[in-house]
Image (cartoon, rainbow, N blue to C red):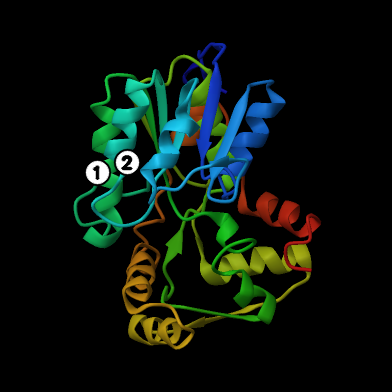
Amino acid sequence: MTHSDITTSTTTTPGTVLVLGGTGKTGRRVVALLRERGVEVRAASRSGDTPFDWGDPATWGPALSGVSAVYVVGPEGSPSPTPGFVELAVATGVRRLVLLSARGTGTPGYLTDAVGAPHRESEAAVRSSGVVWTILRPGWFAQNFSEGVFLDGVRAGELSLPTGDGSAAFVDADDIAAVAVAALVEDGHDGEVYELSGPRALSVAEMLDEIAKAAGVRAAYVPVTPSAYRAGLEAQGVPAEEAAVWTEAMDPILTSREAPLTDGVRRALGRPPRDMADFARDAAAAGAWA
């Protein structure tokens, strides 16, 4: 380890931390890690302990009452409600914001407007908030294979996606949560934009190989065209607009724009990101593909 790999952040003592999306992929991990540190946490979601609905601003104020820091996971769709929420949060005394954004948000043409616009609006709101802020830009989550949109295909033994031979440096949600917690409870992350990736780029077929080695579950990757994928989603009852967004979101994998490795995990935590072999081993042990 070189000197530049060593974090110099010092732990601060936050008050109550509000975690939006507290039952989601990253949110529930952030909640768990904060509680391990003895931090008072308020897990907010439509179905969580603290009621919170992006579509119902009347739920925002009660969730923010007495909160000093917020992990912000905004909704899809533009215009984003995040700017209004950030304004209210600062007005009620929040002094620290950690935003979950997305890889490519700062790169013109990386994301389509439908995908990128709400992230850009959210980032602008956090940057101009006047309080301590940190932005996380993770790429595609490894957990999409174990608890997300790809899980059913893996379990069924066939995963059809419009990603061709493209690859992505899939990032473990455990790493995203660890970076978020560091930014929420430590000094030294103010104004940082952490681009988060895993330590190596893999195609979807190679990810399925890692899962097969760890879990003994072999799923075949079946490449399909974007139009066929979109039509398949619509045939399953997915609304046309949502099917289009999902299809467009696959393009950075298809074109390998998600492949380059980034240093956000190391800069924030002083260690390399978790490898996909470790992700697959732990997910298999937890029964993800049983």
> Where in the figure is residue 270, as x and y percent of width and height?
55, 25
**Residue carrying label 2:** 82
* Rendered location of residue 143, percent (x, y): 59, 56
The part of the image, by quadrant, that contains residue 262 is top left
Dot 2 falls on a residue whose secondary structure is helix
Which mark is nearer the camera, 2 or 1? 2
* Residue situated in front as seen by the camera: 33 or 157: 33
What residue type is disc 2 on?
Answer: Thr
Q: From the viewer's side, name the closer residue of 205 and 192.
A: 192
Residue at 38% x, 81% y is 230
215 lies left or right of 155 = right
In the picture, which quadrant includes the C terminus?
Answer: bottom right
Circle 2 residues within 10 Å: few <14, some 14–19, many ≥20: many
What secondary structure is marked by label 1? helix
Mark toward the start of the polypeptide (2 vs 1): 2
Residue furthest to the front:
58
Left or right: residue 58 versus residue 143 is left
Q: Residue 217 at x, y = what percent?
A: 74, 73
Residue 273 visible in the snapshot: no
Give the Cα separation between the discs numbered 2 and 1: 8 Å
Closest to the observer: 124 or 54? 54
The reply to whether dot 2 and dot 1 touch (C-beta < 8 Å) is yes
Residue 125: quarter of image: top left
Q: Residue at x 26, y 29 (%)?
A: 127
Quarter occupied by the N terminus: top right
Task: Please say if 94 is above or below 247.
Answer: above
Position in image of residue 186 (x %, y %)? 52, 17
Residue tagged 1: 121
